[in-house]
Amino acid sequence: MPNNFGGRRRKAPSAKPKPYKPLKLSPQQSDIMDWVSDTDSGSLIIEARAGCGKTSTLMEMLPRIVDHNRRATVCLLAYNRAIAEELKLRVAGMPAAVRYNATVGTCHSVGWGLLRPLLHSKGGKKNGGKVSMMIAQYSRRDVTTAYIRKDFGSLIKKMVDLAKQHVAPADVTPDWDLWPHIVEHFNLEQYVTLEAKLGFDDPIGHAIELACELYRMSLDEVSNNSFLDFEDMILCPLLSGAVKPTYDYVLLDEAQDSNPARRQLALGLLSDNGDGDHGRTGRLIAVGDDKQAIYGFTGASSDALDQIRQATDAITMPLTVTYRCPKRVVAEAQQYVPDIEAHDTAPTGSVGRGSVDSIIRLGETGELNSGSKVILCRCLAPLLRLAYAFLKRGIKCHIEGKDYMSFIRRTAESCWDDDPTVFLGNLQEYTKAEVDKLAEKQQNSKAATLEDTSELLQFVTGALLDQQVSVKKTIEVLDFVQDLFTSSEGVTMCSIHKAKGREWDAVFILYPELIPIKWAKMDWEKAQESNLACRHHAVQGHLGVHRNGGG
């Protein structure tokens, strides 16, 4: 089978293939393998709790699928590129029949492989800021469009991105039946500016009209200039008909965080007998955990597994015995995920509660410097306060997530003054005014992010001034923050969102009472905040839960 759907063959990964060793199956895994080996039709959802052998189960399926049908073709869709590369190494160590019949990639790399032969420029021009650039250009057309970027820019960009993720038709109009769902589900009212409210009787309706035009222009940029963004890599193959029934099996990993476009791609790749959905003969195997769905704010469907179940009539089989977490950790996690179980051979482990001072003392002893330990928090500002406390004591540390810096810089620029004392006053006034506006307009997620970012900047600026550090200009405050986000030395800290897919031997949760965040208002937002509460149980083998005991 051609690699990457007819595209150029990629260079082999630099790491060595991992030799295949048959898995010693648990009873639940045996039931799943029996389904693979003994049935010839139907789809399956594997509800796999954290640490329950999801990846190993997926890998073990491949040789069994090929043993069951030597001609069966398989496409394994990983959630991101790093996971895809890891799975490719595992497949490369499997028997020749599996290597020949199985294709591994992300939804985006698979979509790109299908789209690329259709483009004028085969390399394509990819830019994640494409829609923002187009909105800026559109606003500069003449005086009648000058208001668009300032008054509607953020709202239009969000609408266009979500329309792509929901596979809006190429000739989308304001009458498209999914616009009301998108506006309500993602609470797009929060992006309506005061200027838009004052200038238009129906600002959402006007934004939809503009979003439809920008959406069509975006598609034209792909077809005419090979200019595309991340969302286009899945959308355009779907709209162009490039997605063909190809595979007997499609395995979709992290299905709980899939959006409609990813699901349509997975279903569109399934072989059929020419009679559309009713004639689908390919089998979808979706693996996910509804308790780990935390990316609804990016466009993922909060009910993704239910949507797959409805589209395929899939049966559901569980993986609920975790091999990763000790028994006391599992007992803690059962508050949120009642069906998760610790394996009989799991160590006892420990769950502790203490103060910030106790974490600092561990830092002073060097016990946190190992890469096997991490400090997590729902918000960034508390992590930065702890980082400052470490640095004052000569303890090296870093916060993972350098992509946060762009928003931190934008916030600082909104109230900039070279003098850090003046900047601090400006920032406090700006934050109060903006958060009040956002709260009044129910722009909850933006208020939460701004409040967290402002608290972070206020703390650093005030701390550096109070300590009479030789900070002369505000740019030095930003340099201090950037150093924390770009370093990789010492104690590791990160947000719970950034911890997805990771695991450590010991995890310290800073201020768990911050979950759920106060700004979560929509039902799906509250549900995903609840999932974040159990997220820290999904990333470690040993857990320390530390509350502020006055330290």
Image (tube, grey):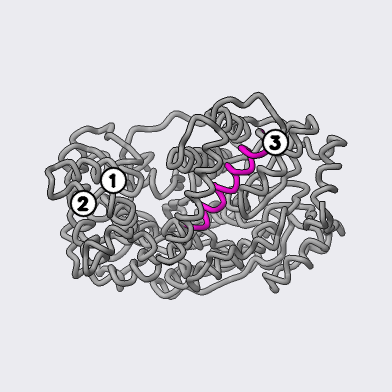
Left or right, 427 with reference to 155: right
Q: What is the C-alpha distance between the residues marked 3 and 2?
A: 49 Å
Which secondary structure lies at badge 1? helix
The region drawn magenta spans: 447-464
Q: In the image, is 8 to the left or to the right of 224?
A: right
- Helix, strand or loop at disc 2? helix
Q: Badge 1: how crowded within 10 Å, few (<14), some, or many (20+)?
A: many
Identify the residue position indicated by label 2 in the image. Answer: 214
Magenta-colored stretch includes residue 460: yes
Quarter location, residue 90: top right
Q: Residue 279: percent from the left, percent from the top? A: 30, 70
Residue bearing mark 1: 131
**Residue sitting at 31 percent across and 37 percent down?**
126
- Residue at 28% of width from left, 46% of height from top? 131
| Callout 1–callout 3 Cβ contact below 8 Å | no
| Mark 2 and mark 1: Cα distance apart in space | 8 Å
Q: Which residue is mark 3?
A: 466
Whether residue 342 is in magenta: the answer is no
Residue type for callout 1: Val
